[in-house]
Amino acid sequence: MAQDIETIAQDLDEWVYNHPWAKGGYVDPNSTREERIAYHSNQSSTNPIQQVRDEILGLVERILELKLDKKIVEIGFGEVGGTHRILKQLFSEVHTVEMRSHVVDRHIEEQQNGEKGNSFFYIGASTDHDVYLDLCRNVVQCDAIFIDGHHSRNIVESDWRMYHHLVRKGGMVIFHDTICDFEGEREVAGLVDDLSNGKIDGKKYKFEHIHKSLDVGISYYIV
Ligand SMILES: C[S@@+](CC[C@H](N)C(=O)[O-])C[C@H]1O[C@@H](n2cnc3c(N)ncnc32)[C@H](O)[C@@H]1O
């Protein structure tokens, strides 16, 4: 299933830079949140992938090293689904929760020629009990979870509390946007700190950080 990092990076670059309408490229590692909000005022400036190149490729390298390749759960598809597209190349099954059905439908039409292939979609809020049960019953156990849905403290903490137990021993629990918090809006870094310090369930989770930007960042721990 998985290929080498160079092949994946080359394929991703080609896709990101030649997307038919989302011309925003990767997230600029030196941009600030305010600059990004101002820049994304029209559809053509959308990022095909809402990731900093070196950060997402750093994560791909780690997934390859750990030989994780069966199932991943992704919370938050994004506008165009660039991360979903990479995960499809790495895992036999990608189970994605997204509350906006139109972004998923558009991706299936535009990028997957109307076929779902190894993608499994759950449309609705990650905290909705029907969505949650549907996913848990289908997945049972997975190799990794990538949490990048709603970024408020209560929702990201709920996502972790609800889904982290699905990850098998040796698998990865991954969070996105972990460099700094913007109060009331993006509060993942605070949760990562609290998990590291044993403030959530008494256990001190050992996080690795892939921080190669001003304020985006990926962090994970191995179960
Ligand atoms: C930052 S984007 C994800 C970007 C994606 N990981 C990428 O790299 O391209 C967050 C997505 O999560 C979705 N979302 C927000 N809150 C959610 C929730 N509670 N449940 C499911 N999806 C949610 C949003 O609609 C949005 O598409």
Image (cartoon, grey):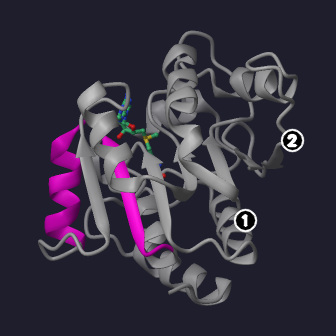
Q: Is residue 79 visible?
A: no
Q: Determine crowd level at label 2: few under 14, some 14-19, many 20+ residues with C-alpha closer than 10 A.
A: some
The amino acid sitting under disc 2 is Lys
Residue 206 position, x and y percent, is: 86, 41
The magenta span reads 91-111
Name the disc covering residue 206, or none: 2
Name the disc covering residue 112, or none: none
Instruction: Point out the tag, 2 or 1, that comes first from the N-terminus.
Output: 1
The reply, left or right, for residue 160 in relation to residue 82 is: right
The amino acid sitting under disc 1 is Gly
Name the disc covering residue 58, or none: 1
The reply, left or right, for residue 150 in relation to residue 41 is: right
The reply, left or right, for residue 48 in relation to residue 71 is: left
Report how far apart the C-alphas of labels 2 and 1 lie in the structure: 18 Å
Q: Is residue 121 visible?
A: yes
Depth order, front residue of 97/202: 202
Q: Which callout, 2 or 1, points to the residue nearer the camera?
A: 2
The reply, left or right, for residue 18 in relation to residue 108 is: right
80 to 159, vertically: above or below: below
